[in-house]
Structure formats: C-alpha cells, structure tokens
Image (spheres, rainbow, N blue to C red):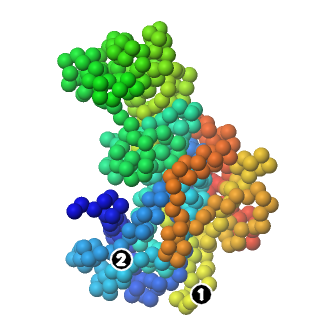
C-alpha cells in the first residue's frame, strides 16, 4: 500500500553540507572543544548592489531542514567509506539531533546590512554542521523573495504569476514559488509547490498546443470546450488581431483573458484592449509574459495590462541570484563547564569583518510608524521608548521547533513591513539601503559600523 503524502518520511538533509564541516567537528572532538557552547550568526555585510532592502524567506524551509537533519545508516556508511569521518564521529552522528536554540527574523520580514537573520546557539559541533544547509536555503530564497517583492510593488495591485520552473532546477523551482507567493505573488504554475505549500496553481496552453491543430480556431475551440469560457487564450502564435477576434467570436464575448508573450507588450496591449472593447469584450483581461522583470513591469504600469507572468528573472533573483549571507561564530564559552560564560569572538579579515557577541535587533520607527533605522546591538536591548520593534523571534527552543507558521501569516507580515518602509524603498533606481544600520556596543552606545560603509556597494 502506498502511504499518503503526509505519512512519507522526509528525506534526510544531513548531507546537504560541506565536507569541511565534518572535518572540523572531527578535529574539535580530538581537541576536546567540540561540545563547547557557541553562538553562530547568519547575516549579510551588504545588500546586492543598488538594492534598498532585502527580504527574509526560507524560514519555514530551514525549520523543515533542521528537523530532517539526521544521519541514518546510509549517510554514515557513505561518510565512513569515503573516510570523511572515523568510528567515533560516526557514533556521535548516529545520535545527532539539534538540541540548541535558534532565533531569527521571521518569513516576510525585511532586512538590511548587518541584520542578524539567524542566531544559532548550541554546542560548536551541533551548530557548525548546519552552516551549509542554512546558507543554501537563505541565500536562494531571500534572493528570489527580494526580486519578487520589487515586482509586486511595480505591479501595483495587478496579480503576478510565478512561471519560472523551467528556468531553475526542479527543487529550486518549488522553493522559488514559495518565496514569490510569500511576498505577494498570486499564484504559481508549479504543481509541486501547489501541493506542498497550498499555493494556487494556474496554467492553460502553450504555443505547441496551437501548432498541434490544423487551425488556430480548432485549437481554441478544443481549449474552450475543456476549460470553459473563462480560460486564457494565447493569441500571438500567428496573427494577434485574428486570434483575438476568433476567441471572442467562439465565446460570444465571454472570454476570460488573452495572453501576449512576445513583441512590444505595451503597444500590443493597447491595441488588443481597444480591439476587445470594440468587440464588446470589455471584461476580457490581458495577461502579459515574455522575460519580464521589475523594470519592465514598471514600464508597463501605464499599459492596459491586467496581470503579469514572470519566470527567468524571478528564479534568478533578477540580477542578484544570491544574497551573500555568511554564517560566523560570534561567541563561545571559555570551556565546557556547565554555565561557563560566553565571550565574543570575531574575524578581522580585510573586508570580511564580523562583529563578536550575541546580538539583539530592533526596527526603530518614527512617530508615524515609518522605519528609520535598523538597531543592532550586543547584549541586552535598551529599554524601549515604544518605537523600537523587536525583530528576532524564537524558532527552535532546546531542540524543539516552535517557529512554524502558515504561509498566509508571512504574506501578511510582508505586506505590513513594506508599509513601514520609507517611500525611497519603493524606487527601482539604484540607491543606498532604505534605512541606516546603527550598531551599538555592549554599553548601548554607538559603535564603529563596518556595515554602514557597504550598504549599497
């Protein structure tokens, strides 16, 4: 008997990691430091060039990945056979469960240079081996979400459809659909994303369907007979005007939508709108596709377009396919003794500085509720004067996942936090981060901030 989907065990994510993470654990065990309490931080030193804000996405996927980070017999046999690990480490990995605590910015939140998107506390060994899987998810999902958020802003309440599956690998395609829906896309063409995340799916026909039939009218008639008058007809296989007239005649003016996929979309949309109206099809919508990005969507805002299908640019982050996130040790205990205090550690590498110490993060709002600064500090947050919104929420507590939430909650959060941002954040022109990052030291006073120098470079 085939098990139901929710009864199928999630595949292990334990090998979605880099070789050196296990060699570090192996060497740390030999030196007696593997179980020393440690704090890691996932952050970015800068936004992609010219971007004014970043978007947090992938939190739900990361929680699933941590939950499935298990070394079964197959994984351990592979690691032993390739001599990545020895027998002692194999025994530890066989019992591995993350037992620490993770705080993070939730899905749909925005971030700026230096924002501590994740803070992971546990033993060095159990926290360090999560590095690659955490970065893999965040670097991709946040890149797609940031591009998608800008597209939704430019669409100005007109629906955007995620259609990028064929431009990404099969797993990234599902992740991209989730990230896009999280920030306001209306639907996806990807059925796996529809099943896994409950995202509405859409799709009608491609040019091949029209070419399969002897005439365009024959193809349209077949589609209409199967999907009904509310379907969307692709009208640019041959002659656009003839196709529109055929679609309207076959539906007696009740056609749901037409799709344009080539040429000068603004000019064609205007011509098609005029034609539809002249034929009495005033309710027939116009959907446009064809390698759109946020800039082209912005250029089409004045055209009579009712929706946008976006593919390649979306799933590749619209020119910024990764966010440059890093995962760094920022604090550790002096020894393995229970209750041993943490002390800050930091890199001093040229252009790759990290700031030691466990962080807090606040969004400072003005009297109108608009964001004016990202306040990141070390130690205890200052006493709030009611205009500082805490950004870090518990995601995992003592190994128990507590941060799962419906995707709808993340969508609503993103809508809300975008409304907090200054109007400059909505511009497509290149510029600095929409709000400044303020770094406070452990005394609560402003500290030298390397992120301020790299906000938009």
How many tags in the picture? 2
Question: Does residue 434 show up?
Answer: no
Query: Helix, strand, or loop for circle 2?
Result: helix
Q: Which residue lies at the image location 29% right of the left edge and 83% below the top edge?
A: 86
> Image quarter for residue 43?
bottom right
Instruction: Find residue 277 and report its horizontal and vertical position in percent.
Output: 48, 12
Instruction: Tell me: residue 178, above or below residue 428.
Output: below
Q: Is residue 19 left or right of residue 59?
A: left
Q: Which residue lies at the image location 76% right of the left edge and 56% below the top edge?
A: 387
Q: Which residue is mark 2?
A: 23
Mark 2 surroundings: few (<14), some (14-19) or many (≥20) residues within 10 A: some
Which tag, 2 or 1, sits closer to the chain's start? 2
**Which residue sits furthest bottom?**
337
Query: Which label was assigned to residue 250?
Result: none
Q: Out of 80 and 418, give the one closest to the viewer.
A: 418
Instruction: Tell me: residue 87, above or below residue 69.
Output: below
Q: Which residue is mark 1?
A: 340
Q: Out of 84 and 110, give the one closest to the viewer.
A: 110
Instruction: Find residue 73 and report its horizontal and vertical position in percent.
Output: 26, 77
Q: Out of 203 and 347, give the one closest to the viewer.
A: 203
Q: Out of 343 and 223, give the one closest to the viewer.
A: 223
Instruction: Find residue 362 and report its horizontal and vertical position in percent.
Output: 68, 60
Query: Helix, strand, or loop for circle 1?
Result: loop
Mark 1 surroundings: few (<14), some (14-19) or many (≥20) residues within 10 A: few
**Image quarter in which the N terminus is found:** bottom left
Q: Which residue lies at the image location 46% right of the left edge and 31% below the top edge?
A: 308
Q: Nearer the viewer, mark 2 or mark 1?
A: 1
The alpha-carbon separation of the residues under discs 2 and 1 comes to 25 Å
Question: Does residue 88 show up?
Answer: yes
Instruction: Find residue 376 and report its horizontal and vertical position in percent.
Output: 66, 62
Q: Which residue lies at the image location 28% right of the left edge and 86% below the top edge?
A: 87
Instruction: Tell me: residue 344, above or below residue 371.
Output: below
């Amino acid at each position: 008997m085939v098990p139901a989907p929710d009864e199928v065990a999630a595949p292990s994510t334990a090998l979605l990691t880099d070789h050196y993470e296990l060699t570090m654990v192996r060497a740390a065990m030999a030196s007696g430091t593997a179980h020393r309490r440690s704090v890691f931080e996932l952050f970015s030193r800068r936004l992609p060039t010219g971007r004014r804000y970043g978007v947090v996405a992938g939190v739900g996927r990361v929680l699933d990945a941590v939950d499935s980070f298990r070394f079964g017999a197959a994984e351990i046999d592979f690691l032993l056979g390739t001599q990545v690990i020895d027998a002692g480490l194999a025994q530890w990995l066989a019992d591995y469960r993350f037992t620490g605590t993770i705080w993070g910015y939730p899905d749909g939140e925005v971030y700026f240079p230096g924002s501590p998107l994740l803070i992971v506390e546990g033993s060095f060994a159990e926290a360090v081996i999560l590095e690659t899987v955490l970065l893999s998810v965040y670097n991709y999902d946040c890149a797609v979400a940031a591009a998608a958020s800008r597209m939704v802003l430019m669409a100005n309440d007109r629906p955007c459809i995620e259609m990028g599956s064929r431009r990404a690998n099969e797993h990234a395609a599902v992740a991209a659909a989730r990230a896009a829906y999280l920030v306001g896309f209306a639907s996806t063409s990807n059925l796996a994303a529809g099943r896994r995340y409950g995202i509405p799916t859409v799709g009608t026909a491609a040019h091949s369907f029209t070419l399969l039939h002897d005439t365009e009218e024959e193809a349209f008639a077949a589609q209409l007979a199967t999907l009904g008058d509310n379907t969307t007809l692709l009208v640019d296989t041959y002659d656009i005007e003839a196709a529109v007239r055929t679609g309207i005649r076959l539906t007696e003016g009740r056609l749901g939508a037409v799709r344009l996929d080539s040429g000068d979309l603004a000019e064609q949309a205007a011509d098609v709108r005029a034609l539809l109206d002249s034929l009495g099809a005033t309710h027939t919508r116009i959907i446009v596709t064809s390698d759109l990005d946020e800039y082209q969507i912005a250029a089409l805002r004045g055209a009579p377009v009712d929706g946008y299908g976006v593919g390649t640019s979306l799933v590749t982050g619209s020119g910024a396919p990764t966010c440059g996130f890093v995962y760094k040790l920022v604090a550790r205990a002096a020894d393995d003794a229970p209750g041993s205090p943490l002390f800050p550690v930091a890199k001093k590498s040229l252009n790759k500085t990290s700031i030691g110490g466990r962080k807090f993060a606040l969004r400072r709002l003005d009297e109108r509720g608009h964001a004016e600064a990202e306040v990141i500090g070390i130690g205890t947050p200052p006493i709030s004067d009611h205009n500082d919104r805490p950004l870090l929420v518990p995601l995992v507590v003592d190994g128990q996942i507590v941060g799962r939430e419906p995707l709808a909650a993340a969508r609503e959060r993103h809508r809300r936090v975008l409304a907090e941002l200054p109007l400059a954040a909505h511009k497509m022109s290149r510029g600095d981060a929409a709000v400044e990052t303020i770094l406070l030291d452990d005394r609560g006073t402003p500290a030298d901030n390397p992120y301020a120098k790299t906000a938009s470079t």
